[in-house]
Amino acid sequence: MDKQIKNGVSIIVPTFRRPDGLKVALESLMHQSAGDLAMEIIVADNDPAGSARGYVESFAKTSTIKIHYLHVPEPGVSNARNAALKAAQGRYLAFLDDDQQACAGWLQTLLDISAKYEAALAFVPTHARIPGTSKYNDYLVDFFSRQGPHMDEGLIDSFFGCGNSLLDTHLCTLPAPPFNVDMNETGGEDDVLFSQLQSQGINIAWSRATKANEDILPHRATPAYVKVRSFANGQGPSQDCADAGNWLGVAKWMLVGAVQYALYAPMAGLTKWAGKPAYIHYLAKSASGAGKVLWFGSFTPKLYGAAVVKNKAF
């Protein structure tokens, strides 16, 4: 192992059939700095056909940062991330998805707040960019963006998704495997991992000094996808309690979900009928409530992995 990268940064970029997004992500990383720390980029191609290989290997020839192409043919977001983490040599793991763009100062800011607050996890905002000119765009931007707390920087008591984050492996203990492979098709594997790390008593840092942009694909910038995604997100609290054997907690979240659905479903119907953009807001709220109630079995949507390969999901 290179002694320099051992104390440096491994940037993890999982990709699945998004050549344009991958190009934007990699080009944005060429403008990043990690001070005196060595850097490497690991592109984990989760397409069984390995469709990103040619572009990544060509890009690597002129890259200012060493790039490793990793083919992970078994579909699944957990599979891709686990394989990338196994190959990563750095102390710090920076995550950027193939639909994201790191803005100026992205990596340095994450490293700075991680060091300043002795934080195992660090986050900055994500700003969603929505295609087209739908009347719902303002609400879709809000739905897909990660605004976070209003403070400029500091410690927070919650976490966000894996894309656009930094993990210091010296300040936590990763499970094996880090990402739950049972969630390859459903997603939520990052929430499970970060929840496990939080239970270790880690610090989590936040800064608004920079951001990452996220380009939302056209088929996701729709009410139908908002409904499915919100339903899946809503299932999380109930499922977490069930996994822990906390059936009182399951009952609590199911009750919360029932009330939430009763309050917001009529508003969703009314705003849809009236053609109001706020329909997206109420649709998301009501679907999340339904997810808390219907958290079990076949109700869980399959949004990733093999389900996508077989064209059975968004």
Image (cartoon, rainbow, N blue to C red):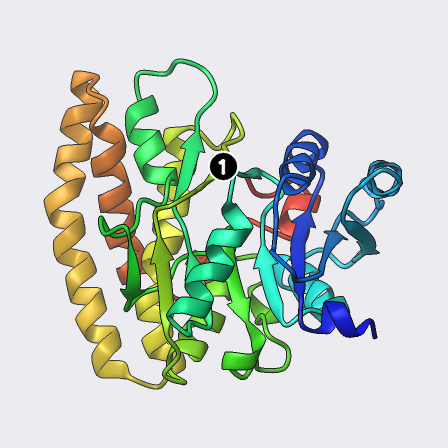
Q: Is residue 173 above or below residue 298?
A: below
- Kindly indicate the quadrant of the structure image that contains residue 27: top right
- Amino acid type assigned to the residue bearing label 1 in the image: Glu
* Whole-percent x, y for residue 288 in the image: 28, 51
Quarter of the image with the C terminus in it = top right
* Residue picked out by circle 1: 214
Question: Is 171 in front, or is 8?
Answer: 8
Rendered location of residue 264, percent (x, y)? 15, 42
Q: Judge from the rendering whether residue 191 lies leftward or rightward of residue 184; answer left or right.
A: left
Q: Position of residue 58 (x, y in %)?
A: 88, 37
In the depicted structure, whether residue 265 falls above or below residue 174: above
Determine the residue positioned at 28% across, 69% down: 157
Kindly state the secondary structure of the residue where label 1 is placed: strand
- Residue 148: % across, % down: 30, 50
Of 55 and 123, which appears nearest the observer?
123
Q: Is residue 301 visible?
A: no
Say if residue 253 shows up in the picture: yes
Q: Residues within 10 Å of mark 1 (few under 14, many from 20)?
A: many
State the quadrant of the N terminus: bottom right
Give me the residue at 88% from left, 42% from top: 57
The residue positioned 44% from the left and 79% from the top of the image is: 196
The single residue placed furthest to the front in the displayed view is: 36
User: How many marks are shown on the rendered structure?
Assistant: 1
Q: Residue at x 83, y 37 (%)?
A: 59
Q: Nearer the viewer, residue 108 or 278?
A: 108
Q: Is residue 107 left or right of residue 310?
A: left
> In the shown orientation, is residue 235 left or right of residue 57?
left
